[in-house]
């Protein structure tokens, strides 16, 4: 479906029974809503209604030009605006990578709208900021973000030689056909710059970020090259609600693609503990 918010038009993949509990799923970089297709198939089979948008910059008609347009408050506003357009007073929220960062921020700032949170790969922003400052391992893992903020240069590197580096980002975790879906989306005019603008506009909630006050499950994988253990282990300190950490041994950063059953089980288990009669 297409949903218009002001001048922006978002593409949203909606599936599952319309009477099911609503679940909004937010993808990360450099992926699209397609990254959720294995997870949503399982959630739909369990009776849930899922909505997976191509987020700001990823939907071709939701691609504003200014870097400042991609700040976290605008990304959170998109989530709430989409929910409003869908008639969802509240919803279960799932996010991976950058989508997890937006999901954390949404749950922190609008706890009344989020019934439950399942965050995949990226921990609470305060835990991540602490790890980035205090843990040399996380600082090393995050060096790529500085390169992504280099306007023009980052695009050239990622798209050179038929987007060879962009394809290499996924390693062997995704089937080739799924990699091509994301690469094809990112090689459309203006798409990669818009996606990189998330990094360029980044404003972390940081050390002062409030705890999440909604039931939360966080999934972290031991073979994630971007997110280390220090932030993952500290995440619990910033959740003032029922919380569970699930560690996936040997799984890469691309958890929804590589371990969809584990993601779906985590979401279903979290929802089972929060659904009201």
Image: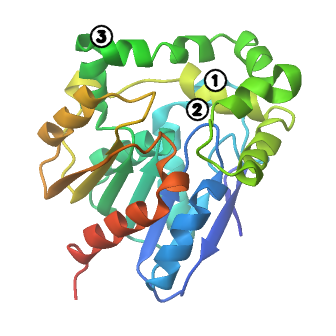
The residues bearing labels 2 and 3 have C-alpha atoms spaced at a distance of 28 Å
Indicate whether 127 appears above or below 20. above
Q: Position of residue 34 (x, y in %)?
A: 66, 57
Secondary structure of residue under mark 2: helix
Q: Position of residue 159 (x, y in %)?
A: 81, 24
Q: Which residue, given by chain and number where applicable, does mark 1 sit on?
A: 67
Q: Which mark is residue 136?
A: 3
Image marks 1 and 2: residues in contact by CB distance under 8 Å: yes
Secondary structure of residue under mark 3: helix
Q: Earlier in the sequence, mark 1 or mark 3?
A: 1
Q: Position of residue 274 (x, y in %)?
A: 22, 73
| Image quarter of residue 37 | bottom right
Q: Earlier in the sequence, mark 2 or mark 3?
A: 2
Q: Which residue is at the front of the view, 120 or 241?
A: 120
Q: What residue lies at 41% left-to-right and 60% top-to-bottom?
A: 263
Q: Let me know if residue 65 appears in the view.
A: no
Indicate whether 211 appears above or below 130. below
Mark 2 vs mark 3: in front: 3
Q: Tell me the quadrant of the picture where the N terminus can be found.
A: bottom right
Q: Which residue, given by chain and number where applicable, does mark 2 sit on?
A: 70
Secondary structure of residue under mark 1: helix
The residues bearing labels 1 and 3 have C-alpha atoms spaced at a distance of 29 Å
Q: What residue lies at 50% left-to-right and 75% top-to-bottom?
A: 42
Indicate whether 190 appears above or below 255. above
């Amino acid at each position: 479906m297409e949903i218009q918010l002001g001048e922006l038009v978002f593409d949203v993949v909606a599936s599952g029974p319309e009477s099911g509990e609503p679940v909004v799923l937010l993808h990360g970089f450099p992926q699209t809503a397609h990254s959720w297709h294995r997870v949503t198939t399982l959630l739909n089979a369990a009776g849930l209604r899922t909505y997976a948008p191509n987020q700001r910059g990823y939907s071709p008609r939701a691609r504003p030009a200014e870097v400042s347009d991609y700040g976290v408050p605008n990304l959170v506003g998109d989530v709430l605006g989409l929910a409003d357009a869908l008639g969802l007073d509240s919803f279960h929220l799932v996010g991976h990578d950058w989508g997890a960062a937006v999901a954390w921020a949404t749950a922190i700032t609008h706890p009344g709208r989020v019934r439950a949170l399942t965050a995949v790969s990226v921990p609470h922003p305060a835990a991540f900021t602490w790890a980035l400052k205090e843990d040399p391992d996380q600082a090393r893992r995050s060096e790529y973000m500085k390169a992504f903020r280099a306007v023009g240069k980052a695009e050239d590197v990622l798209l050179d030689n038929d987007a060879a580096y962009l394809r290499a980002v996924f390693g062997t975790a995704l089937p080739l056909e799924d990699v091509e879906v994301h690469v094809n989306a990112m090689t459309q005019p203006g798409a990669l710059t818009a996606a990189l603008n998330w990094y360029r506009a980044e404003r972390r909630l940081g050390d002062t970020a409030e705890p999440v006050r909604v039931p939360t499950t966080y999934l972290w994988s031991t073979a994630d090259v971007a997110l280390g253990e220090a932030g993952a282990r500290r995440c619990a300190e910033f959740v003032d609600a029922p919380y569970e950490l699930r560690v996936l041994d040997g799984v890469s950063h691309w958890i929804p693609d590589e371990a969809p059953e584990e993601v779906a089980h985590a979401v279903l288990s979290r929802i089972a503990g929060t659904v009201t009669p």
